Image: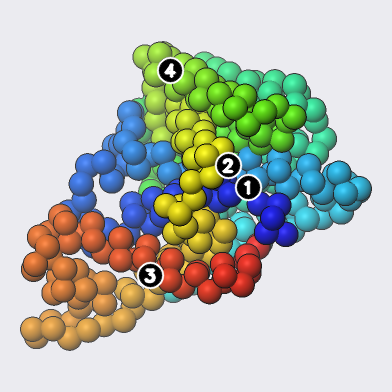
Amino acid sequence: MAEERLSSLDVFRGMTIAGMTLVNNPGSWDYVFPPLRHAEWHGWTPTDLVFPFFLFIVGVAISLSFSRKIEKGIEKPGLYLKIVRRSIMLFALGILLALIPRFNFSTLRIPGVLQRIALCYLFASLLFINTRVRERAMTTFFLLAGYWLIMKLVPVPGYGAGVLSYEGNLCSYLDTKLLAGHIYKPTFDPEGILSTLPAIATTLLGALTGDWLRSSRTIIEKIAGLFIAGILFTVSGLLLHPFFSINKQLWTSTYVLLTAGLALILLGVCYLLIDGMKIRKWAAPFIILGTNAIAVYVGSTLMVKLMALIKVSAGGKVLPLKAYIYDKLLAPWAGVYIGSLIYPIFLIILWIGIMLPLYRKKIFIRI
């Protein structure tokens, strides 16, 4: 039911999916402002916050959704069926998006964004319905500490232990051994096998946040808790960076701490404004996107692939539709960088318009 939704979480989700659309769809990859690019390796940019924010939100939603189902008396076998079915559908949808449009199975990338979401949702959900808060907190700690130890102590053939270079790290070694020919780059995948473990920890931190929001504490106490925890996690990630580098592609434990901390702070802002102060008008576009976030992500991905197939003749050249819009309609008057930025902004506005009728009719596409 719509009234059961936490509006501030929908806004946060909508902001995140808007950010994902913004950074994934520049008019030209040759002209992207630095904050809208991922860090090349160690370190971080605002772009590196988007995916962990989404997994954090998945965790919050797990707590809110499954707690209600458990309170309604739904038995565990029914919950298991829902969890497994949704996980399989998300993973399969990710594979399908990777195959479109050429369906080349020989070079199919098996890991991916939706695939990681599916795995994190699967394990975090199973843990949620089978453990208590303290046990989930301890599991999160051991995932982060264990990943840190594994990355630092397990030797990689030809490189040794504790090497966190692009090709010398343990994640890269495992991916090339187990998924050779089916990863993002020949020697590495940012959504690879081993780095999924700390990504699950990101999701569990979201679930623990959901537990906090479900508690009987006052709204002031909840908001204060979000900000205090957010500051502590953020500072911890930054202070530990010299010992285990913040790295999105390796999804390092310090990266989890930093991004979870910033997610807590941003959710705290949304919760304060929307659920605390009831200031909601500014958030309407984000609520529209946030209530159908997966549909927007899948739809925008398919749109990009479709626009690459549509060809337009211009000045004696045949250009893909996207290149035509950028080269001929945006860059000439806005400039190469601003034009490249305007393109995804138009996409975000377009998807708000597409999702608006669904939102008004309270149609939320669930997978």
- The residue at which mark 3 appears reads as 350
Residue depicted at 26% across the width and 41% down the height? 35
* Residue 312 on image: x %, y %: 22, 84
Answer few, some or many: residues within 10 Å of disc 4's Cα (few below 14, many 20 plus, some between 14 and 19).
some
Res. 6 mark = 1
- Closer to the observer: label 1 or label 3? 1
Q: Nearer the viewer, residue 70 or 301?
A: 70
Using the rendered image of the protein, determine whether residue 120 is visible from the camera's viewpoint: no
In terms of sequence position, does the residue under pointer 2 or pointer 4 come before the other?
4
Examine the image and state in which quarter residue 95 appears. Answer: bottom right
Rendered-image quadrant of the N terminus:
bottom right
* Residue 248 on image: x %, y %: 41, 35
Residue depicted at 53% across the width and 74% down the height? 357
Label 2 element class: helix
* Residue 337 on image: x %, y %: 15, 55
Label 3 element class: helix
Q: Is residue 288 left or right of residue 366?
A: left
CB within 8 Å, label 2 to label 1: yes
- Closer to the observer: label 3 or label 2? 2
Answer few, some or many: residues within 10 Å of disc 3's Cα (few below 14, many 20 plus, some between 14 and 19).
few
Using the rendered image of the protein, determine whether residue 248 is visible from the camera's viewpoint: yes
Residue depicted at 33% across the width and 28% down the height? 42
Q: Nearer the viewer, residue 242 or 345?
A: 345
CB within 8 Å, label 4 to label 1: no
Label 1 element class: loop
Res. 235 mark = 4
- Please, what is the three-letter code of the amino acid marked with disc 2? Asp
Res. 114 mark = none
In terms of sequence position, does the residue under pointer 3 or pointer 2 come before the other?
2
Task: Give the spatial CA distance, label 4 vs label 1.
Answer: 28 Å
